Amino acid sequence: MTENELSGLLIEHGQEHILEAYKRLDEEGKNKLSRQVERIDWSIVDMAVSEELAQKRGRLEPLSALEVPEIEKNKEQYEAQGLAAIRAGKVGAVLLAGGQGTRLGSDGPKGKYNIGITRDVFIFERLIRNLLDVTDKAGCFVPLYIMTSDKNNDETVAFFEEKNYFGYPKAFVKFFEQEMAPSVDFNGKLYMEAKDSLSLYPNGNGGWFYSMAVTGVLKDVKDRGIEWLNIFAVDNVLQRIADPVFVGATLSSGCVSGAKVVRKADPNEKVGVLCLEDGKPSIVEYYEMTDEMINSREANGDLSYNFGVILNYLFRVDKLEEIMNEKMPVHVVEKKIPYISESGGYVKPEEPNGYKFELLVLDMIHLLDNCLSFEVVRDYEFAPIKNKTGVDSVESAQALLKKNGVQL
Ligand code: UTP
């Protein structure tokens, strides 16, 4: 981009302060900042000052789940079907590890966090252990793709190297970096984190498939003949990965995607609920539900909107390719964003001071025709680590791991 083009663009979008910063830089700095500006999706940045931040919802209806008793009845058949797909090389796994874990307050990748009590037990290690349970049974390995971001990629890769991939064969592991998005103050002005750099952040967990494509990792998926991808979050240390029962059940349902869900602990639990929106699968957030929806019950007394998602999904690769270029909603989220002030000082705010822009994987579900809602038992499969203490914390996950016989 020429200097004129850059200045035109920044003025057009009311970002003159970036132009001023640019003018103060040497050639190398100018190039760096200019490359960052060139990659900005302005339609996203402009959302910060648009009136309509809330997503409009269509007609919502409950979606029934394949519940535990039914799964238990057919478990052997599902498992055999799932293991056959794994052995045929049709299943890959994608670990979403590009987040920053700000709530946990650890500086590095969340997966490096040590949750051991009497010995070292790292989050990444737990996840690999869970995957090995399946691959031991299948007698073959499942290709594992790990999404990182510019902020944590090198540290993540170095950690896996240092720990010898926790016993998983390196040839079956590939890292790829997600896209970054800018951050702005409440008036839509871009923040800078250094004199030659915008404050860029990972763009949420919803762009993972697009990032697989642009980084070239999708080619590996295709070359290997993988037809299904199981994506999962870094912080649920109890989850089953490439779970053959889940794979088998989704295959026999004929659905193009599957979502592991847990029964809500109470009607007001703060989880995203899998339902139907205008006839297509969709996830509605707890704050988007009316009181009537929250308390609505079926004839058998169960809540109508009874199942919360746990960020463990199965997707058919060919369907993902079809929807890859469809526009996903951008979530504009208030955050505390460190920045450099005009005088050049580094500021770490105590309160939210602006917006980040995120794509969310849950919005992908709505782009697909159908989704199997697959119930799992919370105490056996859901121990997310979001915070240090309290709800969804290191402490609560440790208690659940112990309950499941994991030595910490
Ligand atoms: P969270 O929404 O819990 O975000 O991510 P986070 O960044 O880990 O934690 P906080 O909110 O800053 O405390 C759910 C999953 O999505 C991944 C995370 O790594 C986690 O596995 N994720 C999130 C990404 O891969 N990229 C992102 O940009 C955001």
Image (cartoon, rainbow, N blue to C red):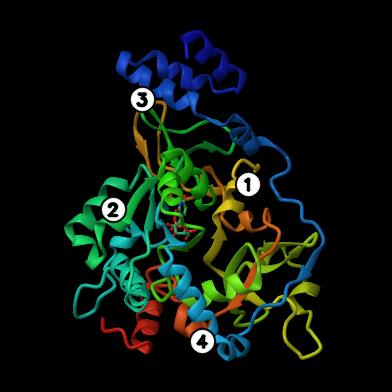
Residue 202 picture quarter:
top left
- Could you tell me which secondary element the residue under label 2 belongs to? helix
Q: Which residue is mark 1?
A: 322
Is residue 206 visible to the viewer in this orientation of the structure? yes
| Mark 3 vs mark 4: in front | 4
10 Å crowding of disc 2: few (<14), some (14-19), many (20+): many
Residue 196: image tag: 3
Q: What's the residue at 32%, 72% (across, down)?
A: 126
Q: Which residue is mark 4?
A: 76
Q: Amino acid at mark 1?
A: Glu
Question: Vertically, is 68 above or below 337?
Answer: below
> If you read the primary sequence from the N terminus, does the residue marked by circle 3 or circle 2 appear first?
2
Q: Which residue is mark 2?
A: 156
The residue lying toward the viewer, choosing from 346 and 401, is 401
Is residue 391 visible to the viewer in this orientation of the structure? no
Q: Amino acid at mark 2?
A: Thr
| Mark 3 vs mark 2: in front | 2
> If you read the primary sequence from the N terminus, does the residue marked by circle 1 or circle 3 appear first?
3
Q: What's the residue at 54%, 75% (across, down)?
A: 248
Q: CA distance from mark 4 to mark 1?
A: 33 Å
10 Å crowding of disc 1: few (<14), some (14-19), many (20+): few
Image location of residue 242, percent across then percent down: 44, 69
| Mark 1 vs mark 3: in front | 1
- Mark 2 and mark 4 residues within 8 Å of each other at the beta carbon: no
